[in-house]
Image (tube, rainbow, N blue to C red):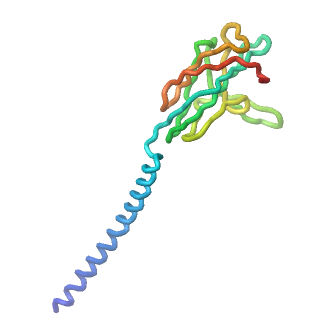
Amino acid sequence: MSERHLWRPTRRRLTDTLLAALAPVAACSVALGGLTTWVGTGNAGTPASVKVSGGRIFLPYGDSRDTAAFFDLANSGGADDRLVRVTSTGADGDVSLSGHRAVGVGAAAKESVESVTVPAGSRLSMSPHGVDVTLRAGGRWQVGDWVPFTLHFERSGPLKAIAVVVRPAS
């Protein structure tokens, strides 16, 4: 057999090996370029950063002491966070998270929820038609009173907030 015939299989194996290695190298290069762009624009590695504002609590009506509090939550971070618990030294008894869902025309049902997600780069405004904080009023609250709360987040930790007592129609 001539040297020429021996060289062809070796050259073919070398070409096949280089082509087989080219696909993963190209895929890694594209992925690395995408990640570099993502990091360069400031979107990578940013932790959740939740701010609490707009705290308000409904003045209980009549003889009832059960009421609801509402907060505006803004997450300017790059990761989702979850509100997992709410506490208040101004409430009598337990404080819980509640959600409301429509169950028919003009009717809604309240149910306890374990947590509330605050998506990255988004706002969540609690309302009587969505998520709220359910509690029993402490003492004799009047319009304008301030009630202290601590909102406990999975990633951001506990955040202190104040809710002002308002009439439900306001």
* Rendered image quadrant of residue 138: top right
Q: Is residue 89 above or below residue 161?
A: above
Which percent across, then down, holds residue 7? 20, 85
In front of the other: 101 or 25: 25
Horizontal and vertical percent position of residue 166: 73, 19
Q: Which residue lies at the image location 43% right of the left edge and 49% below the top edge? A: 39
Q: Residue at x 70, y 30 (%)?
A: 127
Picture coordinates of residue 162 (x, y %)? 61, 19
- In the displayed structure, would residue 161 be above or below residue 23? above
Considering every residue shown, the one lying at the far bottom of the view is: 2
Q: Is residue 147 above or below residue 101?
A: above
* Residue 114 in the figure: left or right of residue 168: left
Q: Is residue 139 left or right of residue 3?
A: right
Picture quarter with the C terminus? top right
Residue under the image location 51 percent in, 24 percent down: 158
Residue at 58% of width from left, 13% of height from top? 89
- Please, which residue is most extreme toward the front here? 41
The residue most toward the right is 105
